[in-house]
Amino acid sequence: MPTKWLPDSANLTHLKHQAKDLLRDFRAGHMSAYQRVREFHPKFAGVADDAMPGRSFALSDAQLSIAREYGYASWPRLRAVIAERNHEELVLTHNDRLPDGPFKQALDFMDAGDAARLTAHLAQHPGLIRERAHFEGGNYFQTPTLLEFLPENPTRQERLPENAIAIAEILLAAGAQENLAALTETLGLAASGRVCREAGVQGPLLRLLCKHGADPATAMHTALAHEEFDAARVLIDCGAALDLPAAAALDERAAVARLAVGAGEGALQLALALAANAGRTEVVQSLLAAGADPNRYNPPGGHSHCTPLHSAVAMGRLDTVKALVDGGADLSIPDIHNGSTPLGWAAYLGQDEIAAYLKSLG
C-alpha cells in the first residue's frame, strides 16, 4: 500500500485524532481499518478480517499504524519529526538527502558509469558495500545499500548508465553478492522498475542477480503488480514457479483453471487483484466462479489500498469492470487513502466511458 504524504501543515494534534479515528473504526469492524492495520502494523500482518475482532488493539497500536502509514518507524519518531519540522526534506531527491561522504561519492561514480573510479573507491573503502543509507517518509527504499540504488527505482535521474550491468558486476564482486537481503530487494526493484526496462537492462540485470543467489520467486508478484510482464517471464526462466497469481496476470488461462481448484483464499484474492489490474477479463470471470470475492480489498502486493474494481477502473479496463460488476462487485466501497468510489476514480482519471457505464448503474 502506498504511504501517505506527510503534509507541511501536519501537527501532532491532528495525528492523534487520526489514531483515535483508526482505533474507533477498527473496533467498529470497518474493513478499511483492518486493511490499514494489516498493512502497517507488523503484529497484524496476514491476519484475516474475520480474525481481527478477537485481537487486542489499543491506542498505542493505532499510533504505530499511523506512523508507519506515513513512512516512519514508530510513533515517537513521527512525533520527533513533527517537532523538528524536518520532513520538508522529502521533496529532495534521494541523492540530495544523503550526507556528503564515501557512500555518496560511490553513488556519484555509479550514476556516472565511472567503472574505474568506482572500483578504486570500493577498494579504498571495503566496508562501504555493506553500508546502508537511511530514508524516511516512504514504504520502500528505506535502508538501501549501494546495489539497491542501481535499478533507479525510485527514480532519481530517469536514466541508467550505459554500462549498468558492468557497474552491477563491480558491486557484486566487491561483496554485494554476500548480502542476500540486498540481492533480493534489488531484484524486486529491477523487476518492477520502468527506467530499468526502458534502459534495456532489466532482463540482463535480473538474470545476473539470480545467478548470484537472488530468489526469482521473491520478485514475481511485484513485477506483475506493475505490469512488468516481460520481467515476470525472465523470472520464470530463472526458476520462479508459475503460481495462480502469476498465471492470472499473465493470462495463462489453462494454468488458472488448473491452479484455482482448491486454491486458498489468499492466492485467489491476489490472483483476482492482478488479473483485474491487467485487464484479463476471462481470467477474472473464472476466478470469480472459483470463489474469489470482488468486494475485498486487494491483498498486500496487489495495490492493497483499493478493490479489484478500483484497479480495473484505474487501468481503463471497461470489459473487466463489467465482468466484476456482473460478478457482484459493490460500487460503493471507497478506496482507503482518498475515500473515493470506483466512479470517483473514473471521473478523476478521465476514464469517461467507464464513468458513464458506472453512472448508468445508478
Image (cartoon, rainbow, N blue to C red):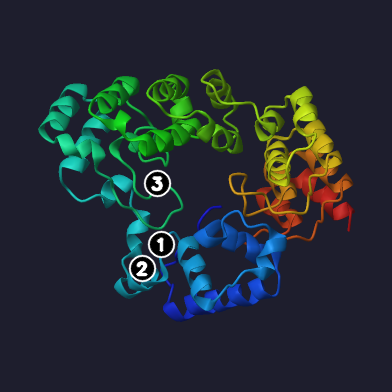
Instruction: Say few, some or many: other residues with alpha carbon within 10 Å of mark 3 (under 14 / 14 to 19 / 20 or more).
Output: many
Question: Disc 1 versus disc 2: distance between alpha carbons?
Answer: 7 Å
Lower position in the chain sequence, tag 1 or tag 2: 1
Q: For the point 36% across and 37% down, which residue is it?
A: 182
Q: In this figure, which residue is indicated by the disc labeled 1?
A: 72
Q: Position of residue 173 (x, y in %)?
A: 25, 24
Q: Position of residue 312 (x, y in %)?
A: 72, 43
Asked if the residue at tag 3 contacts the one at tag 2, i.e. Cβ–Cβ closer than 8 Å, the answer is no
From mark 2 to mark 3, how far is it between C-alphas? 18 Å
Q: Are marks 3 and 1 in contact (CB under 8 Å)?
A: no
Image quarter hosting the C terminus? bottom right
| Amino acid type shown at disc 2 | Arg
Q: Are marks 1 and 2 in contact (CB under 8 Å)?
A: yes
The one nearer the camera, 98 or 250, is 250
Please report the residue visible at 67 percent of the width from the left and 39 percent of the height from the top: 274
Residue 331: tell me if it is visible: yes
The image position of residue 202, as x and y in percent, is: 46, 24
Looking at the picture, which amino acid does disc 3 mark? Phe
Helix, strand or loop for disc 3: loop
Residue tagged by mark 3? 141
Along the line of sight, the residue nearer the viewer: 175 or 106: 175
Give the left or right position of residue 9, taking residue 269 as reference. Answer: left
Q: Amino acid at mark 1?
A: Tyr
Categorize mark 2 by other alpha carbons within 10 Å: few (<14), some (14-19), many (20+). some
125 shown above or below 67 = above
Give residue 233's position: percent from left, percent from top. Answer: 58, 22
Q: Secondary structure at mark 2?
A: helix
Q: Is residue 212 left or right of residue 229?
A: left
Tag 2 residue: 77
Q: Secondary structure at mark 1?
A: loop
Res. 337 visible in picture: no
Which of the 4 image quarters holds residue 258?
top right
